[in-house]
Image (cartoon, rainbow, N blue to C red):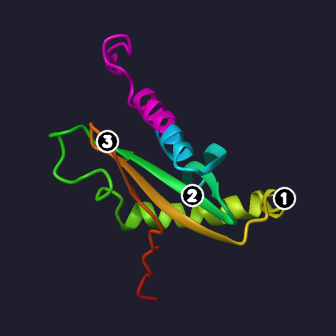
Amino acid sequence: MTPKLPSDRYFPSRRGSGLAIEARAREFLHARGLRFVEAGFYCKVGEIDLVFQDGPELVFVEVRMRREGFAWESAIESVGFGKLRRLELAIRFYLLRREGLLASLGVRSMRLDVLGFDGAEFEWRQAIEFPRSGR
């Protein structure tokens, strides 16, 4: 028999708090001049939290949250090799699915940003490089 989980009424779901942080992240990036394109792109290989346009550049944003004092690493440091690999695959899939959108936006380049929230404020790292495997 599967144990009954506590109600979200008393223990808010991680998904709910994640959506709230993503909404704050949207406001944070919009206030810095980026134009919102899309949120919550899901595919078989992964998900993309937010997509923005920064001039002629398409910006894929991974939003991470850590509660202050409850983690060994910062929110940004929590994005490891595996997550970056899944993001790279999800971005490739996104580009295949949204080919017409890219042309209509006049996109000439792309980048991956990570926006970390550690309980008090956002830390924004731009142009994260994808790790290359040794193949």
Residue pictured at 36% horizontal, 20% vertical: 12
Asked whether the residues under the numbered discs 3 and 2 touch, taking CB atoms below 8 Å apart as contact, a structural biologist would say no
Residue 104: assigned label: 1
Which mark sits nearer the N-terminus, 3 or 2?
2
Residue 18 included in the magenta stretch of the image: yes
Pointer 2: what residue?
60
x then y, percent, for residue 24: 46, 35
Residue pictured at 37% horizontal, 68% vertical: 81
Q: Give residue 17's quadrant in the image.
A: top left
The number of numbered discs placed on residues in the rendered structure image is 3
Q: Is residue 40 above or below residue 131?
A: above
x then y, percent, for residue 25: 47, 41
Which mark sits nearer the N-terminus, 1 or 2?
2
Residue 8 included in the magenta stretch of the image: yes
- What's the amino acid at mark 1? Ser
Name the quadrant of the N terminus.
top left
Other residues around mark 1 within 10 Å, as few (<14) / some (14–19) / many (≥20): few
Which mark sits nearer the N-terminus, 3 or 1?
1
- What's the amino acid at mark 2? Phe
x then y, percent, for residue 108: 72, 72
- What's the amino acid at mark 3? Glu
Query: Which region of the structure is painted magenta?
Result: 1-24
Disc 3 or disc 2, which is closer to the eye? Answer: 3
Q: Is residue 9 above or below residue 34?
A: above
| Callout 1 secondary element | helix
Q: Nearer the viewer, residue 122 or 82?
A: 122
Pointer 3: what residue?
121
Q: Is residue 101 above or below residue 15?
A: below
